[in-house]
Image (tube, rainbow, N blue to C red):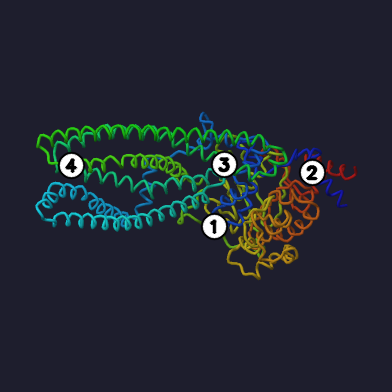
């Protein structure tokens, strides 16, 4: 009988099944209409149980599971798409080009919001640097005094002025060093607080964004935003801003000193900054374009690496190593070219700035020397002026380094601001508009589900579900079957509120899902998918994701009710065994049992099972079927099914074609009829006989 059931179940999902031509992944409906190839949506959705009290629907889990919204499998099996998305500058989709729309002023507002809470410490750091530069710039004045006053005094036998100059110079160096140390400490604390805040914002915002965003914006790009782009900002804050402030303060102090020492020398020195300013503006314009392209190129590399490593099994199975190597080499070369362009822009600036600076110094020294020879300028003043000029122009190279960091950070901050400017397409209701679910009408946990005038189309086009009405009574188990792209998974996602309908309403006991707070919704509706996602951590911690405040006794009770206790107890550390990344330490069937225990502990009113047994072997399926009997008892359930054994446990079957329900009835009624489900059952029966 086991063999017959296995054969029949296989026939249900394969060629003999007129409703299921191939394995319908949970994303097939969206793939057909969006063309996004996000093949592992079901994996990410499994996290909805784990994140039910965190308000993230499944966003955080999705990336952890598939790495890049299914890109690993997508690339490995069918070629590389993600990298092409980044490279294809002609594409009309901002997501593909990694150029999310950024509202005007968003970058400045982001930086302001990061610094505003720390304005006091920013002001303190600025004052410390101001004082440090004032002390440092006293040096050339002491040199001028020594040449014009102290040396003649020594010749006259008075060593006091020269000793005073030496002591003053030493004190200036000591005070400047202490102020520099204090500035570095103060600014470093501000920098680290800003980066901590920014990384936290990116992570929290990414979790809060809706599923459709994560289906279009790969996790590799999110990783690039929170690592490479944040690192660019770190370099600017920790090194670049100090260089900028040093150059600006040096220019102000030195220009004032030169004008005070000699109006002619000072005026010539200030005039030399006009060509330098024009050079800086040119560098900013050219380098800004380069760094925006470089940020996208870095993200493309990370996306490719992440999706390949997450899809390493199909990569090896379909011998995609050479093709992936070639694609990665292409992206790597592109990154190399962009980096080369950035270096060339920096080189042009450095050469140009040094040419201007050296020409200005040579002209001022030559003119000053003639004036000293004519007796219209003191030698000490000329020496001080030359020292000030060197101090004025020496930071120019460092200014170039700042501009380099600034352009890189500006491009990165623009990318981050674009990400943070995205708003969830499935928004949380306003607190005053949120409604609680009414008290349950019976001792059973199930609630009534209604699809009222619902129509759904993805924002990228393609209607998936034409307008329909559907009611699922409380406590009823409904199996949904149909061919790939029929709309089964989209129906489930609307019920889980991973999407909102284009038209109409989805009601839970008469309450529109859009009026339920996320915590209330996740307590009421839970989804378990084909590949249950487990986090790194213990078995108990993964089960407790369904209800974080559950006691160990409640966790073990849920596992026993599902039938998972025995295998958990046999693990090296029982419930405290670390399942490792993605639950790799236990089998697929065991992971599914943990997911059911998690769902049972969450105690939802509505449970959605999306292909929950389609990837399991016969022993695993038997264990999961027993768990399903327990977890579905008394609840309203929607079961996306491929296997006939799963359909048989349902009270009602919906057969879908092209987004419409074409048959609706009990399994026995539909088998006795002459519709698609009867054909399906006949194919199963023939396969058993054969």
Viewer-closest of 340 and 295: 340
Of callouts 3 and 2, the N-terminal one: 2
Farthest-out residue, top: 90
Q: Which mark is residue 258?
A: 4
- Disc 1 target residue: 54
List the residue tagged with mark 2: 12
* Front one among 148 and 456: 148
Q: Nearer the viewer, residue 669 or 11?
A: 11
In the displayed structure, does residue 296 sit left or right of residue 551? left
Give the alpha-carbon distance from disc 4 to disc 2, as whole Å: 89 Å
Front tag of 4 and 1: 4
Residue positioned most to the bottom:
553
Q: Would you name the residue on which mark 3 appears?
A: 303
Nearer the N terminus, badge 1 or badge 2?
2
Marks 3, 4: nearer the viewer: 4
The x and y percentages for residue 301 are 55, 39
The answer for how far apart the CA atoms under marks 1 and 2 are is 37 Å
Q: Secondary structure at mark 3?
A: helix
């Amino acid at each position: 009988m086991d063999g017959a059931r296995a054969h029949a179940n296989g026939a249900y999902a394969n060629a003999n099944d007129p409703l299921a031509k191939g394995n319908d992944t949970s994303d097939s409906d969206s793939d057909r209409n969006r063309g996004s190839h996000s093949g592992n949506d079901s994996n990410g959705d499994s996290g909805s149980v784990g994140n039910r009290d965190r308000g993230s629907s499944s966003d955080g889990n999705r990336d952890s599971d598939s790495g890049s919204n299914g890109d690993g499998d997508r690339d490995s099996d069918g070629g590389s798409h993600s990298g092409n998305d980044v490279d294809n500058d002609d594409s009309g989709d901002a997501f593909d080009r990694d150029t999310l729309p950024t509202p005007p002023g968003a970058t400045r507002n982001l930086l302001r919001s990061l610094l505003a809470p720390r304005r006091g410490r920013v002001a303190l750091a600025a004052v410390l640097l101001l004082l440090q530069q004032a002390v440092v710039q006293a040096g050339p004045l002491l040199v001028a005094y020594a040449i014009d006053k102290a040396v003649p005094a020594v010749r006259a036998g008075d060593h006091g002025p020269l000793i005073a100059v030496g002591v003053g110079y030493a004190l200036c160096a000591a005070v400047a060093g202490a102020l520099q140390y204090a500035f570095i400490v103060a600014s470093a604390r501000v920098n680290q607080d800003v980066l901590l805040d920014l990384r936290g914002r990116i992570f929290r915002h990414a979790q809060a964004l809706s599923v459709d965003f994560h289906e279009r914006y790969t996790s590799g790009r999110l990783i690039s935003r929170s690592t490479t782009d944040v690192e660019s900002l770190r370099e600017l804050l920790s090194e670049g801003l100090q260089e900028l402030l040093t150059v600006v303060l040096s220019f102000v102090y030195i220009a004032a000193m030169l004008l005070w020492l000699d109006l002619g020398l000072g005026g010539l020195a200030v005039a030399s900054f006009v060509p330098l300013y024009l050079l800086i503006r040119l560098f900013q314009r050219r380098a800004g374009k380069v760094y925006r392209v470089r940020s996208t190129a870095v993200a493309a590399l990370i996306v490719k690496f992440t999706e390949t490593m997450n899809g390493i099994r199909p990569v090896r199975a379909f011998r995609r190593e050479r093709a992936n190597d070639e694609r990665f080499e292409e992206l790597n070369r592109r990154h190399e070219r962009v980096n080369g362009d950035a270096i060339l822009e920096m080189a042009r600036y450095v050469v140009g700035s040094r040419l201007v600076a050296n020409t200005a110094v040579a002209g001022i020294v030559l003119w000053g020397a003639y004036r000293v020879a004519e007796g219209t300028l003191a030698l000490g003043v000329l020496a001080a002026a030359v020292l000030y000029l060197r101090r004025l122009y020496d930071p120019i190279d460092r200014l170039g380094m700042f501009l380099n960091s600034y352009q890189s950070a500006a491009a990165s901050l623009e990318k981050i601001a674009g990400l943070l400017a995205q708003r969830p397409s499935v928004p949380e209701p306003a607190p005053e508009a949120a409604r609680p679910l009414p008290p349950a009408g019976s001792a059973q946990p199930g609630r009534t589900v209604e699809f009222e005038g619902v129509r759904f189309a993805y924002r990228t086009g393609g209607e998936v579900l034409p307008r329909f009405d559907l009611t699922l009574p409380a406590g009823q188990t409904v199996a949904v079957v149909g061919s790939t792209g029929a709309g089964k998974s989209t129906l489930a996602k609307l019920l889980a509120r991973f999407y909102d309908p284009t038209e109409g309403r989805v009601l839970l006991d008469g309450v529109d899902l859009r009026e339920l707070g996320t915590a209330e919704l996740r307590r009421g509706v839970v989804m378990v998918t084909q590949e249950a996602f487990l986090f790194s951590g213990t078995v108990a911690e993964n089960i407790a994701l369904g209800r974080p405040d559950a006691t160990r006794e409640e966790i073990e009770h849920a596992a026993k009710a599902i039938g998972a206790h025995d295998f958990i107890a046999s693990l090296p550390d029982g419930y405290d065994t670390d399942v490792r990344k993605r639950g790799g330490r236990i089998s697929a069937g065991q992971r599914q049992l943990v997911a059911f225990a998690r769902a049972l502990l969450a105690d939802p009113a509505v449970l959605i099972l999306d292909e929950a047994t389609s990837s399991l072997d016969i022993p695993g399926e038997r264990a999961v079927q027993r768990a399903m009997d327990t977890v579905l008892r008394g609840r309203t359930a929607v079961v996306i099914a491929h296997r006939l054994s799963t359909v048989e446990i349902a009270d009602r079957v919906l057969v879908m074609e092209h987004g419409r329900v074409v048959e609706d009835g009990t399994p026995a009624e539909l088998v006795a009829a002459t519709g698609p489900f009867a054909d399906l059952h006949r194919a199963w029966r023939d396969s058993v006989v054969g």
